[in-house]
Amino acid sequence: MRDATSSDATPPSSPTLSRRARERPTDDNVFSRLTSNTQPPTLQPPNRGQIVPNTGKVPPSKAAPVVCTHTAEGHTKAVLSLDATEDLLFTSSKDRTAKIWDLHTGKEKASFSSHPNNVVCVRYCPQSRLLFTVSQSYISVWDTRASSKQCIKTLSSSGLTHDGCVNFGSTRQIELAPGEHHINDIALNEDGTALYSAAGNVVRVWDLKSFAAIGKLNGGHQAAVMAIAVDRWESKDIVLTGSKDHYIKMFEVVEERAGIMTPKYNLEPPHYDGIQALCISQDTLFSGSRDMCIKKWDLSSQQLKYSINSAHKDWVCALKFMPSNNILFSGCRGGFLKLWNIENCNQLGEIKAHSSPINSIATNSSAIFTASNDHTVGIWAIKSGADVNENGECLE
């Protein structure tokens, strides 16, 4: 691992996992809720998914301080994207559906099937309780407050807005409408007032009060933007874009968010291959790439702090922080889940989480969720009382 700074000072290490476990409250969480009911599970309607206990499909590993407790089963093809709150899990899949799962009951709450092709991204806005799903050149906006969970708007890559849902029928759509491009990623800002969507090398800015396209982040990339991360600094949205051109750009988006905005900074040096994942918290950004490298950036100085070369043996496809721990999770195309100390980038553990690629990672205060091509979502917990030695190995 290479330190990009000239200083030899070592950042303070994180508290051990066992100390954090002692400090965390022992109130009810997703795992106790899912396992507290000893009654046999009720039969679900046809095609209804369930969250079921892990019965040895993912064997425990002494080398990792996490254990797979449950899997969400119900999609019929690869699971491509995840989002999560304390109570709900959101998934999207190549089977052209997105689903909402109740983490209290372990059951699928709703399924959304009106998509033209693979549902490549799902994002939930807690403030408005709107769900956003991406398929081809369209973003479907679903009102989860209504019992019918209806689609209220459809946003397109060209900037057009349609009322309700576009009906694509039962046939998988291959061709795009004229003037449209594939949307690769979307991100919501902190207060749920703006949505950013990446199509081609341009990021479009949507005002979620009017559902109108009001601005563009343009002029930054020479190839498609594959990942977006958004944070809030004072009165500005800070938007990071990672592209197939190997570069990460940083945009400052003012309150009005209107017009065409160009990058404020270009993060150097670039990755050696396309960017697949970005993860931001305040002034720290992590980027994951097809070059199998994870980089840590200080956004306040726009400087590279660490480069974890050969972090995985295959493309780094997913990155996520766990809010209650000082841990970064990464997932790769080889199916491995790894844990990293956010401060010094030391590896804390790894596990072969899936037999096929990990496409997305989500977290809440007590769980880690991994989406895979094996049609399932793995649900993980930090091992009770787990500790990590100086080599990053799990001690029990």
Image (cartoon, helix red, strand yellow):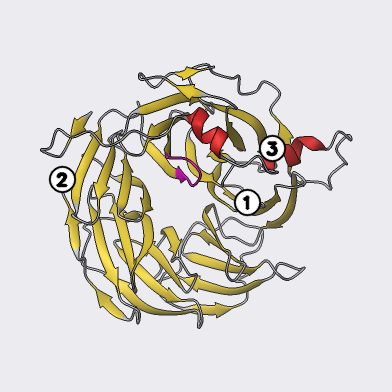
User: Which amino acid is tagged 2?
Assistant: Pro
Label 3, label 2: how many angstroms apart (C-alpha)? Answer: 42 Å
Relative image position of residue 225 (x, y in whole percent): 32, 56
Q: Is residue 73 left or right of residue 372?
A: right
Give the spatial CA distance, label 2 vs label 1: 37 Å
Sequence order check, earlier mark of 3 and 1: 3
- The one nearer the camera, 392 or 100, is 392
Magenta region's main secondary structure? loop
Res. 269 mark: 2
**Residue 363, image x and y in percent?**
53, 45
- Which callout, 3 or 2, points at the residue further toward the start of the chain? 3
- Mark 3 residue crowding within 10 angstroms, few (<14) / some (14–19) / many (20+): some
Find the magenta span and give its range.
321-326
Locate residue 236, reporting x and y percent: 32, 72
Name the residue tied to disc 3: 31
Q: Earlier in the sequence, mark 2 or mark 1?
A: 1
